[in-house]
Image: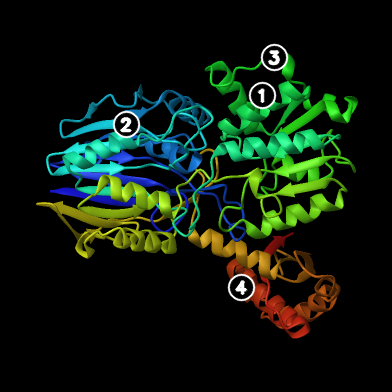
Amino acid sequence: MLHVIPLGGLGEIGLNAMVLACRGEMLLIDAGLMFPTSGMPGVDIIVPDFTHLKRNAAQLKGVLLTHGHEDHIGALPYLLGEIPVPIYGTRFTLALARQRLEELGVKADLREIEPRTPFPVGSVFQVEATRVTHTVPDAVGFIVRSPEGTVIHTGDFKLDPDPIDGLKTDLERWGEAGDEGVLCLLSDSTNSEHVEETGSERVVQTTFERLFHETKGRIVVAQFSSNLHRVRHLLDLCERSGRLVALQGRSMVRNVELAREMGYLDVPDSLFVHLDSVPKLAPHRVAVLTTGAQGEPRAGLTQLANGDGPVRLEPGDTVIVSARPIPGNERSVGALLDQLHWRGARIVYAQVEPGVHVSGHASRPQQRRVLELIRPRNFVPVHGEVRHLHRHLTTAREAGMAPEGLLLAHDGDVVTFEEGRGRFTGSVPTGRILRERSGDGVITQETLVERNRLAETGVVAAAVVLRRDTQALVAGPQLSGQGLSPDEQGVLSRVAQEARAFFEELNPQLRGDDALVREELVKAVKRAFKQHTSRRTLVVPLVVRV
């Protein structure tokens, strides 16, 4: 029997982590994270719950990485910190993974692989990487052979007829595997709702050339720092048009430096200037490549929108946002665009100029082409929210797949394959672990609830001073509020008076118990505050004895 067990990525964009298990051995494809929404104060990242792997650590023989995006490699440090296993990936993917691991002081056994060169993982699995076109160099899918049959995991891919690096998705190898027989296909579902062909990156290249030609002022381009194919043609365009390049954002600087060191970007040092130098250069002589196309609060584009940092946007500047909002980021991106417009620059983004961005994921017709090429006996759509997975299944049905081979799995499901057929046989623990970026800072759901409650109600600190000998009230309650409206702040003095009157009625003998004093103090302040504001607030009591 072969078990396919998604620990993340089936029901959300991100958290990609897929387990294959057979004859007492397991491998994991990707270990990704996702980023928090606005309702998660203090949360930096979200990683999958790896409880199932921890319980079966001796069975895990390796991790296969499809590519270097955070939603596929970002959770590696938190997995390897507890289960040290070999990591397999292509050259650039491993370089990105190494950076993440070194940041957190995690050592790893990193093993470089080449497309079309099979290698064993443990004694059960034979694996072969296949080149795919995506937005980051060295992306691959995997053909995994097991005693029960062959599984193909596409990774994130699209079918670009003319990619920037000339490396197309290896449909020939997928087709050969299909001819041999594929037990199950696990395929990227992100763009399953898109009915038009995913455009070639050459469309963006042509659009940028036109925009650069017609722009006389400074140009700012905001994009994902990992989209190095796009960075590549932007740098070439700047070199040809006589513009110097300033990099803004830690990840942009880091990824460009890494790509240059490894030979993926071949541009001279003389092309680059420090960001501080931009205001001193003639506007037509400079371009800024920045992070923040998703409205991240600390990213480069947000700094420009807020007027922070050395570069100030002015009329005559052009800002190109070369990305579409990730689901869930629409509101923050819209607010950022509004702020940029107030700066007086020309703002170009995909809704008004579609050619400034194309997706790195296959759309519906490309997904169907892969299904018809591989002809799997079973199909499990992966990498998408539930509606994306549903639509991808519909595409498979329209392509002629038998209904019994269409399997809609969710995180934690165990899909078991035996004698060519797949069925659901149970579930394993799964979920989302909320974390701070560094250290062991796990944030519980209870903590998150409390933080959101604080955001909704505010907090009032209440202090009383009592004599040790007589328990007499010397001072207080003294109240101090945080997160309160001006009206609520205005009633604190009256609340304090009423709380004092209530407190003075408390039997002096009972005032000797600090726990009881704190409890009664909270009751008094909450009751008086609600009478004046019709709202409840969190009260933090403090008892001082003199």
Pick the residue in front: 135 or 30.
135
Where residue 13 appears, as percent x and y from the top left, is 47, 53
Q: Identify the residue position indicated by label 2 in the image.
A: 129
Q: Earlier in the sequence, mark 4 or mark 1?
A: 1
Q: Residue 176 occupies which quadrant of the picture?
A: top left
Q: CA distance from mark 1 to mark 2?
A: 30 Å
The reply to whether the C-beta atoms of the residues labelled 2 and 4 are less than 8 Å apart is no
Number of other residues with Cα within 10 Å of mark 2, as a class: few under 14, some 14 to 19, many 20 or more: many
Q: Earlier in the sequence, mark 1 or mark 3?
A: 1
Task: Give the foreground label among 2 and 4.
Answer: 2
Q: CA distance from mark 4 to mark 3?
A: 66 Å
Pick the residue in front: 206 or 272.
206
Q: Secondary structure at mark 2?
A: strand
Number of other residues with Cα within 10 Å of mark 1, as a class: few under 14, some 14 to 19, many 20 or more: some
Q: Identify the residue position indicated by label 3 in the image.
A: 269
Tag shown at residue 519? 4
Tag shown at residue 236? 1
Kind of residue indicated by mark 1? Asp
Horizontal arrangement in the rendering, residue 464 relative to residue 437 (left or right): right
The relative height of residue 239 versus residue 197 in the rendered view (above or below) is: above
Is residue 290 something that shows in the picture?
Answer: no
Q: Residue 202 occupies which quadrant of the picture?
A: top right
**Which residue is at 9% across, 52% downward?**
419
Q: Earlier in the sequence, mark 1 or mark 2?
A: 2
